[in-house]
Image: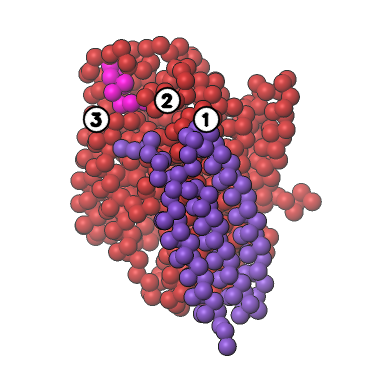
Chain colours: A purple, B red
Amino acid sequence: MIDPFHINILSILVFVIAAMGILISMNNLIKVFLCIELMFLAVSINFIAYAYAAHNIDGHVFTVFLLTVAAAESAVGLGILVFYFRRRSVISVADATVLKG
Amino acid sequence: MIELIKPILPEMILFFGACLVLLLDVFQKFVDHLMNLSSVLLVLCIVAIVLGVPDGVYYHNLCVISMFTGLFKIALLTLALFQFLATSFLMDKYALNKNEHSVMVLFLIVGACVMVSANHLMLLYVGMEIQALAAYTLVVMQRKSEYSAEAGVKYFILGSLASVLYLLGASYLYGAYNTLYLHEIITAIKAGSTLGGLGSILVVSAFLFKVGLFPFHQWVPDVYQGAPTPSTSIISTLSKVTAVAVVLKLICGLFYDNKSLDTRWIFSAIAILSMIVGAVVPIVQTHMKRFLGYSSIGHAGFMLMGIVNIHVVGVSSIIAYVLIYSLTLMMTLICLMSLKDKREPDEERNDLELSKLGGLSQVRPKHAFMLAVCFLSMAGMPPLIGFFPKLLILQYIINQGQMLLTVFAIITTVISLFYYLKIIKLMYIDMPTKQSIGISVNVNMRLLWVFIPAVIIQLLGCYIPILQTIYVQYVTPAAETLIIGTNEKIYS
């Protein structure tokens, strides 16, 4: 029998994979954005599992909102990425060292 | 129909007004007047809040209107109005499209107002994202600057991580209590559960990120420095005021009278470490906006001390602190903005090097005086208004017997006085050099209309009774709505 606890572990696993992904893909902004999207999805799994177990619709609605907002967020993020690439001709976060001190 | 939308009338005015401004921006005829239109919208919105619906909950408990939300919304709108009036004739120096800028500020305020009055975790999330997306856009608005680009990338990545933290926390709270309404969670959390405790800490820490407190403070100096100065002044004041409002709402709700979860030591540690960062790091900074960013971390830590033991007095002194500090910071940044001369955007980084302020009092005496007043006010010198909230918070933590916090607060305040005085020495004692800013600037005389009210506000600290009246009549009741039996009174 699968209960929310097992789904919770799955979501934490996906979350940790995404976090590791951000750490090891610092040379490529697109990969970082992908990992952030993966984190959003990990959280959505969590919401759906709890909503399903409690027979409560709120979690499902939250997931729909979450996906929509995440799409808007990645649109803005890609805009910033294009802007960054035009100015710096790289898409590596590791090279973002102009601001320091 | 009008009854139906009355509780969210301010947000509606702002949202449709922002769309209208965006639409009119394409007509050459209107381009020069749109900043004034935005200011009118803000005034309309303040009127709508003052004459608005009575306190209570609306839309099936989704939205709360209370003294607290009213106070914070009016503060946000007033700050934005101040910025619009002061900068409408400064924007051309920045290679910014001033109409796009004001549209983004209006959207940011829509998100902020939604956040302040939200009573539902999903609504809070949507408000937070509206506000954050507008803020990311504001940072990258200067199209020719690579500093702006880099600050935008950093802000976006770290900001998305913060919203993911919030979502994870919200999902645990939902899993523990099967509801997304804040008031139901607040009632249920008193019983205590591991999942709920974890969720509430994650949710609060996402907003601690937005305030820029110690473990999550890395973005603050980078974004402050990289963003064009008009955007810095919006992000450092409006976003911070909103985040403080939400942090107060969440902490007072989730951790007040909560036997199962003792958060006092966590908040003490965060406050002390933030104050240390804010006291030590600015000493070695050479860039004005970076310096202000680091010192704002210290101020945030100072504020957080008021909520270590949750009590009405502490909360109301935090509200007073954040409002007065934001106003002072905005004045400082407007002053710096007016010193900019028209060069290539990428030179802006060098424009605000601290060394270029040398001898400012001889070149631009009014600006130097204004900056000196603002810095002394931030340091908490008695005749100025910044002294008042510092006194309130220190008095409160001494009364609570938090001796460790008191000692750290006083030491860090003294150190911060040192670096503020260092800048004043730079402006008043050093000689101007060829690099000094302000030599080649034609200062627009309309700035006097900003400077005179600003100095009057700063000098209000001389006249304590009027501050006391405002504090007792507006700020304390606002804090009371957060704590004393709000749940039972409103939702029954």
Q: Which residues are magenta?
A: B352-360
Tags 2 and 1 in contact by the CB under 8 Å rule?
yes
Q: Quadrant of the C terminus of chain B?
A: bottom right
Alpha-carbon distance for marks 1 and 3? 32 Å
How dense is the environment of label 2, judged by Cα within 10 Å: few (below 14), some, or many (20 and up)? many
Which structural element holds mark 1? loop
Q: Are marks 3 and 2 in contact (CB under 8 Å)?
A: no
* Total count of labels: 3
Can residue B213 be found in the magenta stretch? Answer: no
Q: Please give the residue where the numbered disc 1 appears in the rendered image.
A: B142
Q: Name the residue rendered at 56%, 46% in the picture.
A: A77
How far apart, in angstroms, are the residues tagged by discs 3 and 2? 24 Å
Label of residue B348 in the image: 2
Tag 2 subunit: B
Amino acid type for the residue under numbered disc 1: Gln
Q: Secondary structure at mark 3?
A: helix
Please give left or right for residue B436 compared with residue B184 in the image.
left
Question: The numbered mark 3 sits on a residue in which chain?
Answer: B
The foreground one among B118 and B215 is: B215
Which residue is at a point 24% across and 36% down the rendered structure image?
B283
Name the residue type under label 3.
Answer: Leu
Which label sits in the foreground, 3 or 2? 2
Q: Are marks 3 and 2 on the same chain?
A: yes
Q: Chain of mark 1?
A: B
Label 2 amino acid? Glu
Above or below, B299 relative to B96: below
- The residue at which mark 3 appears reads as B421
Residue that extends furthest to the right in the rendered view of this protein: B1
The image quadrant of residue B462 is top left
Question: Is B313 left or right of B28, judged from the image as shown?
Answer: left
Front residue (pair B99, B115): B99
